[in-house]
């Protein structure tokens, strides 16, 4: 118990529990920032596992002395209750804090983090600027303390770390001792967009010939480091998982005869031993996720991919758990590049720990809130088995997103608890470490999770409790930026954020290579720019109920049209963009010295102009398609006028964005410089001016899909 004088806070509870200690510190920090209470406030934290489930908590008001009693179903639940108190102080809503019980809507709410460990043990995405910049960060305890604290504040409780072949950087394998890597290396070689998107050439010989050592650490120090990270995560109620792609052997350098050949018995032995040591070395590791790709080898082999995965990961986990009876552990098998029947056949001895993982929106969570792709998997998964959702955000890298209505609807449309193990959210093409694109970035550079705090807050808090109201989030925004009228900022933020789902449901490219909405682009940039012709030939998202332009032309004369047409999408893009700009005209007229607020308003303005660009481009594509069919000159002229407006909006978008962010090399798209893309935007006008009626008959619709998220 901490005693308190009038006008102070008294804590009662076991502060030896790190979760409760963290919550108390958050309450103190909130009180210091907001001013100490005018009267004595008592906060009592305790744990009662008999009355509440894990992560659950109950808040009760105490009259004498005045304060709150927080009861958690476990220390994490007590922490969450304490964080509610801290937030109520921060947003000046302590008097409105309601009594009641709280239980997680989704039990496991996670972050997907492609982790760039070392030039010798890369992730799937390391040939991008942001990943290279974050290699030193992921070996910093300061970074992970800050990162995990933020996760806890937003109620995330799962961290998944994804790497092609992490073992040499994180474990020592007795049978293969020389594979373990000391120190942390980063190449000095300037990278480009010529790398394979399968990860098969992620480490090139020339990259290893010019390196810098960014951390000097023995393998034992690395193991101690990751044990500390996992302990710190545990102390914030967060489970840690490692995920791999296969078969990659980066870092082994051919030692002991290890190769990426599926039929190499030494490789099987090496992986099995590495998995065993990973599980044994890290008692707090919650599970391993595995992938039957991207480098399993082609053609007939002695071992099928699933047989190989069982003999390495399956048997390795069993070896480790054999002397750890009772340890809770998950083996998560992704559906990617394999079949359900093959998984079930080879992993039948591990059904008690086996779960699946499904790319829920493929690569685009900002599209529609009810993606249809998972339906066949749910229908064919055995009763009682559950899947995780990989919720990929390869839509919004640069900007601050925030629409609680979309996030809430997306979460409520996820499968029910009987089928859902949890979700983890994150990109493949961008590193969610420290921000590195701001033109005048802070030192140390800001966490992406802090820059995009509102987005992370919405997804974390709503996945714990989707009943949280928009007014609650408005009050959070008001407390963060008291300089501005919160209702206007909240509304502008939500309106701007609708741009990305609207355009992606209209113009669909399933994986990140095929569609990057920040740049109207596919790989490789800038040549992969989607032209007005592409918009006519493009597809809409399956299950969106949106007609593409060619479908709309065939249906436009019908009196009944159930689906949404391209002009309705353009209308909604224009409406949300204009609403944003109208509100910003008032907000930006005020004296704003707050750097974060300036940047936030800049993001909203940039995205609004991007929305107006897409609205005019869609209209131009529609009129050009009509001209192709009807041949009326006024239709072509209308198309040209819309595309001139599109260019003007793009120029505003590029100007504002580049005033805040540097161009960057994205591993899945290429080098993205909005000024370099502008000439391609201008060419749309020439395409329309030169268009001849009947051209479409000679063209083939774009193929913008190819990923198969589920095979029975």
Image (cartoon, rainbow, N blue to C red):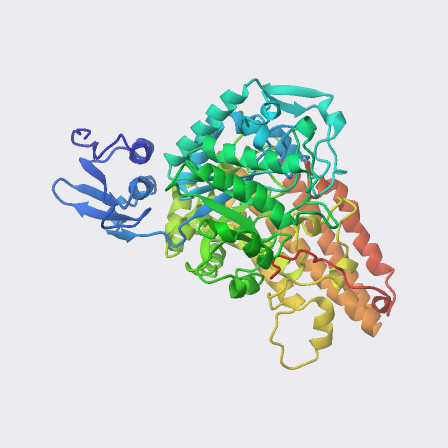
Residue 686 % position (x, y): 84, 55
**Residue under the point 68% across and 21% down:** 211
In the orientation shown, which residue stands out farthest toward the bottom? Answer: 559
Residue placed most toward the observer, 254 or 524: 254
Q: Tell me where residue 448 appears, x and y as whole percent.
A: 53, 37
Q: Which residue occupies the foreground of this view, 335 or 697?
A: 335
Location of the C terminus (image quadrant): bottom right
Q: Where is residue 301 shown, x and y percent of the image?
A: 71, 48
Residue situated in front as seen by the camera: 490 or 208: 208
Residue 129 visible somewhere in the drawing: yes
Relative depth, front residue between 215 and 242: 242
Question: Residue 566 appears in which quarter of the rendering?
Answer: bottom right
Q: Which residue is drawn at 20% across and 29% down?
A: 2
Q: Where is residue 113 in the image (x, y as percent from the top left)?
A: 54, 39
Tell me: residue 390, above or below residue 446.
Answer: below
- Give the answer, above or below, for where 326 lies relative to 224: below
As drawn, 322 above or below 341: above
Q: In which quarter of the image is residue 699?
A: bottom right
């Amino acid at each position: 118990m901490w005693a308190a004088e009038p006008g102070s806070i008294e804590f009662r509870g076991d502060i030896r529990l790190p979760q409760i200690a963290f919550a108390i510190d958050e309450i103190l920090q909130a009180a210091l920032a907001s001013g100490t209470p005018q009267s004595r406030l008592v906060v009592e934290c305790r744990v009662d596992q008999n009355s509440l489930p894990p992560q659950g908590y109950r808040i009760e008001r105490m009259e004498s002395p005045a304060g709150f009693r927080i009861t958690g179903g476990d220390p994490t639940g007590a922490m969450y209750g304490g964080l509610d108190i801290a937030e109520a102080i921060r947003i000046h809503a302590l008097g409105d804090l309601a009594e009641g019980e709280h239980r997680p809507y989704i039990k496991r709410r996670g972050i997907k983090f492609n982790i760039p460990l070392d030039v010798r043990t890369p992730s799937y995405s390391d040939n991008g600027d942001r990943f290279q910049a974050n290699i030193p960060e992921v070996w910093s305890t300061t970074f992970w303390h800050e990162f995990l604290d933020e996760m806890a504040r937003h109620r995330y409780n799962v961290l998944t770390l994804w790497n092609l072949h992490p073992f040499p950087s994180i474990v020592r394998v007795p049978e293969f001792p020389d594979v373990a890597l000391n120190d942390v290396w980063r190449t000095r070689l300037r990278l480009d967009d010529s790398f394979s998107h399968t990860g098969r050439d992620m480490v090139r010989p020339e990259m290893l010939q010019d390196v810098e050592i960014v951390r000097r650490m023995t393998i034992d120090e690395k193991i101690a480091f990751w044990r500390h990270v996992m302990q710190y995560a545990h102390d914030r109620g967060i489970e840690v998982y490692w995920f791999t792609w296969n078969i990659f052997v980066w870092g082994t350098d051919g030692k002991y005869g290890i190769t990426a050949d599926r039929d190499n018995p030494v490789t099987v032995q090496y992986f099995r031993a590495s998995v065993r040591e990973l599980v044994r070395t890290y008692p707090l590791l919650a599970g391993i996720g595995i992938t039957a790709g991207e480098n399993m080898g082609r053609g007939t082999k002695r071992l099928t991919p699933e047989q190989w995965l069982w003999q390495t990961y399956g048997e390795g986990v069993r070896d480790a758990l054999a002397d750890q009876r009772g340890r809770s552990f998950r083996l998560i098998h992704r559906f990617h590049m394999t079949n359900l029947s093959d998984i079930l056949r080879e992993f039948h001895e591990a059904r008690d720990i086996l779960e699946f993982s499904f790319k829920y929106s493929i690569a685009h969570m900002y599209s529609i809130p009810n993606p249809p792709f998972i339906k066949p998997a749910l229908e064919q998964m055995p009763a009682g088995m559950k899947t995780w959702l990989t919720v990929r955000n390869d839509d919004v890298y640069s900007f601050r997103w925030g629409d609680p209505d979309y996030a809430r609807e997306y979460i409520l449309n996820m499968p029910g608890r009987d089928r859902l193990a949890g979700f983890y959210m994150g990109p493949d093409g961008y590193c969610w470490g420290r921000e590195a694109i701001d033109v005048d970035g802070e030192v140390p550079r800001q966490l992406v999770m802090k820059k995009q705090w509102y987005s992370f807050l919405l997804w974390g808090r709503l996945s714990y409790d989707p009943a949280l109201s928009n007014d609650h989030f408005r009050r959070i925004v008001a407390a963060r930026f008291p300089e501005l009228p919160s209702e206007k900022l909240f509304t502008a933020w939500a309106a701007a954020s609708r741009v990305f789902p609207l355009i992606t449901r209209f113009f669909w490219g399933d994986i990140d290579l095929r569609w990057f909405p920040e740049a109207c682009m596919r790989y490789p940039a800038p040549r992969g720019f989607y032209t007005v012709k592409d918009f006519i030939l493009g597809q809409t998202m399956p299950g969106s109920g949106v007609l593409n332009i060619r479908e709309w032309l065939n249906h436009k004369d019908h009196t009944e049209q159930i689906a949404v047409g391209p002009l309705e999408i353009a209308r909604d893009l224009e409406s949300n963009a204009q609403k944003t700009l109208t509100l910003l005209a008032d907000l930006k007229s005020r004296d704003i010295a707050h750097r974060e607020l300036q940047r936030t308003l800049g993001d909203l303005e940039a995205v609004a102009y991007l929305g107006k660009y897409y609205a005019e481009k869609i209209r131009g594509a529609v009129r050009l398609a009509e001209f192709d069919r009807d041949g009326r000159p006024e239709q072509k002229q209308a198309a040209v006028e819309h595309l001139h407006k599109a260019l003007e909006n793009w120029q505003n978008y590029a100007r504002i964005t580049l005033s805040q962010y540097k161009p960057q090399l994205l591993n899945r798209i290429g080098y993205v410089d909005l000024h370099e893309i502008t000439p391609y935007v201008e060419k749309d006008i020439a395409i329309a001016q030169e268009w001849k009626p009947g051209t479409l008959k000679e063209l083939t619709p774009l193929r913008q899909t190819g990923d198969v998220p589920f095979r029975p």
